[in-house]
Amino acid sequence: MGSGGVGGYFGAKLQRAGERVTLVARGAHLEALKRSGLAIRSAIEGDTVVRTAVVERLEGVDRADAVLFCVKSFDTDDAAARLWSILGPDTAVLSLQNGVDNEDRIDATLGAGRAMGGVAQVFATIESPGVIRHQAAGRIIFGELDGRVSERGERLRDAFAHAEIPVELSKTIRRALWEKYLLICAVGGTTAVTRETLGVIRDTPATWRLFRTIVEEVAALARAAGVDLANDAVEQIMKFAETIPPGNRASLAQDLLQGRRLELEALHGHAARLGERLGVPTPTIFAVYGALAPHAAGRRG
């Protein structure tokens, strides 16, 4: 559900492994997928083209064993409501999105226990309609929100592993979601505000300090919200951020540069509001939120 960088990249790998995949897309991307298939241009794995079923609407599509839910966070509610016709009794809706509240919103729409939490560690974007550019990584961490290891989780883990997708079935997915939130708020915030790549961020002392301060503020929020972060979570995120290839920008920055709607509310907006509710100061996060707010709707908005 959503065939951009994340959904397109992982959908293509599952299709190549022999799984029956249906991609949901729209607009020029949909037409290109129907016409020429899905092209993956990977800096790691080379170039491939796969052909899958591709639709705009789900009416008439068979029931799904699992849904990879990869839409932008601002489309979560509407996209979840469109899934009813393909859900079986045990169909997992695995959120591979930015933010920490998408799973709760999916369950609010489809019923408690339907959503699984997931972290997609991948740098992939739509380069042009029908073409995904994969720059780095490609790992999935996922699990049931209540921490149990379910049969549906094991089946999905095995499907990912068969498709040569590095995968971890986690009993602490809430923690993993917040660890990604620490990273994406910092990468997204700094690359969007500066309009620069992560390499420039790291090479500019003041901006690298800004990056760390965002990580520290989100970590304080997580602990105030009862998330069991590791004591050295901030240092782990900073160490990982040093390994990301220098030419990368977060999807928030890519969307800003291309005039598209931003996932600002799910990232810095959510963090700023949560800080107000919990009494945790988030001045740096709010500054990023305020600086990007005029661009949140995109040029067309």
Image (cartoon, rainbow, N blue to C red):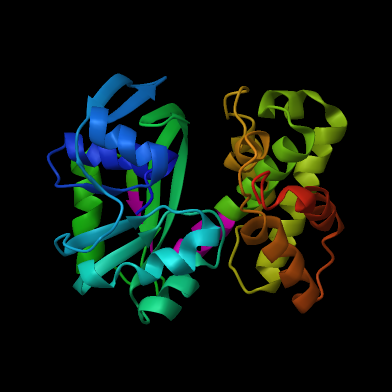
**Is 153 displayed left or right of 198 in the figure?**
left
Q: Position of residue 142 (x, y in %)?
A: 38, 57
| Residue 264 lies within the magenta run | no
Point out the stretch of residues depicted in magenta. 168-179
Q: Residue at x 28, y 66 (%)?
A: 92
Q: Position of residue 212 (x, y in %)?
A: 76, 44
Q: Residue at x 77, y 23 (%)?
A: 203
Q: Position of residue 154 (x, y in %)?
A: 22, 60
Q: Position of residue 219 (x, y in %)?
A: 69, 58
Frontmost residue, 93 versus 38: 38
Q: Is residue 147 visible?
A: yes
Q: Residue at x 83, y 48 (%)?
A: 291
- The tally of labels here is 0
Q: Residue at x 58, y 29 (%)?
A: 243
Q: Is residue 216 above or below residue 139?
A: below
**Is 22 displayed left or right of 102 in the figure?**
left
| Residue 173 lies within the magenta run | yes
Frontmost residue, 194 versus 160: 194
Q: Is residue 84 above or below residue 182?
A: below
Quarter of the image where the N terminus is located: bottom left
**Is 176 displayed left or right of 1 in the figure?**
right
Quarter location, residue 166: top left
**Is 121 displayed left or right of 24 in the figure?**
right
Quarter location, residue 275: bottom right
Quarter location, residue 40: top left
Q: Is residue 164 visible?
A: no
Q: Is residue 156 above or below residue 77?
A: above
Q: Is residue 260 above or below residue 153?
A: above
Frontmost residue, 256 versus 216: 256
